[in-house]
Image (spheres, rainbow, N blue to C red):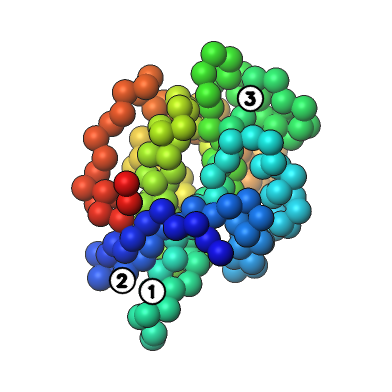
Amino acid sequence: MAASRGGLSRLSVDQPFRIRQYPLESGALEIQFIEEFFGEFDRKKSAMEIRERLEGREHGIFMVEASLPEEPTRFAPVSYRVAHEIRNEETDPELADLVERLREAVRFSGQRVLYAWLGGTRSDWRGQGHFRALDEFQEEWAIDKGFREIVVKTKNRYYEMRSTLTHLHFDVVKYEPHPIHNGDSKVYLSKRLGGGVRRPRRASLARYLEV
């Protein structure tokens, strides 16, 4: 059962939605399920992979559930984000490699850094602001937890995700071109969270967050 942190909000199309934060076990299963709707992902993550990555470190599993047009009282998961702390000294080979790639652009020592690991919106629900709302929620959560920077890794061909991150003032800190397909080039982005100064919460965000 999900641990809800949100009430209802409405998008510009007057479609209600809610944001939930999930505990690790049920959240890992939900992410495994929703990734089946993402055909563009090279390899989908299993619930076991998600649990192994997140256990023992600060993390957040967040999901947007939207009201179904044909049955407004029912809600379905349409967008998700999984983020976790990344440290200066990592034993996980994939995370250790990421730290080394970003060491000249991101300060991992002396501050808490959040890695926005997984995320996306189902293709039939895109363009409605779900992912942006989710990332705003994640940012507020990160500030509450004492994080000072958020980093994201994506591919050049995920234009909608990159556009959302640009609107949220993420900066490109590194670009690794692919030798053959430019769309598969890696793009690394970062956002500083104000050195501990909380930014004003947007009115649209406050409407669906419970204190």
CA–CA distance between discs 1 and 2? 7 Å
Q: Residue at x 69, y 49 (%)?
A: 50
Dot 1 surroundings within 10 Å: few (below 14), some, or many (20 or more)?
A: some
Q: Amino acid at mark 3?
A: Arg
Q: Earlier in the sequence, mark 3 or mark 2?
A: 2
Dividing the picture into quarters, in which one does residue 103 lie? top right
Element type where label 3 sits in the image: loop
Task: Give the x, y percent position of residue 5.
Answer: 41, 53
Up the image or down, 64 lies above or below 116; here it is: below
Element type where label 1 sits in the image: strand
The dot on residue 12 is none
Element type where label 2 sits in the image: loop
Q: Which residue is mark 2?
A: 15
- Given the current orientation, which residue lies at the most extreme top position? 110
Task: Determine whether, in the image, residue 173 is placed left or right of residue 26.
Answer: left
Q: Earlier in the sequence, mark 1 or mark 2?
A: 2
Task: Determine whether, in the image, residue 70 is placed left or right of residue 27.
Answer: left
Q: Which residue is mark 3?
A: 87
Q: Amino acid at mark 2?
A: Gln
Q: Residue at x 44, y 66 (%)?
A: 65
Task: Give the x, y percent position of residue 129.
Answer: 35, 58
Q: Are marks 1 and 2 in contact (CB under 8 Å)?
A: yes
Dot 2 surroundings within 10 Å: few (below 14), some, or many (20 or more)?
A: some
Which of the pair 72/41 is nearer the observer?
72
Q: Which residue is mark 1?
A: 67
Task: Give the x, y percent position of residue 21.
Answer: 49, 53
Which of the pair 204/126 is nearer the observer?
204
Task: Determine whether, in the image, residue 211 is placed left or right of residue 145.
Answer: left
Task: Give the x, y percent position of residue 13.
Answer: 26, 70
Residue 211 visible to an observer of this rendering: yes
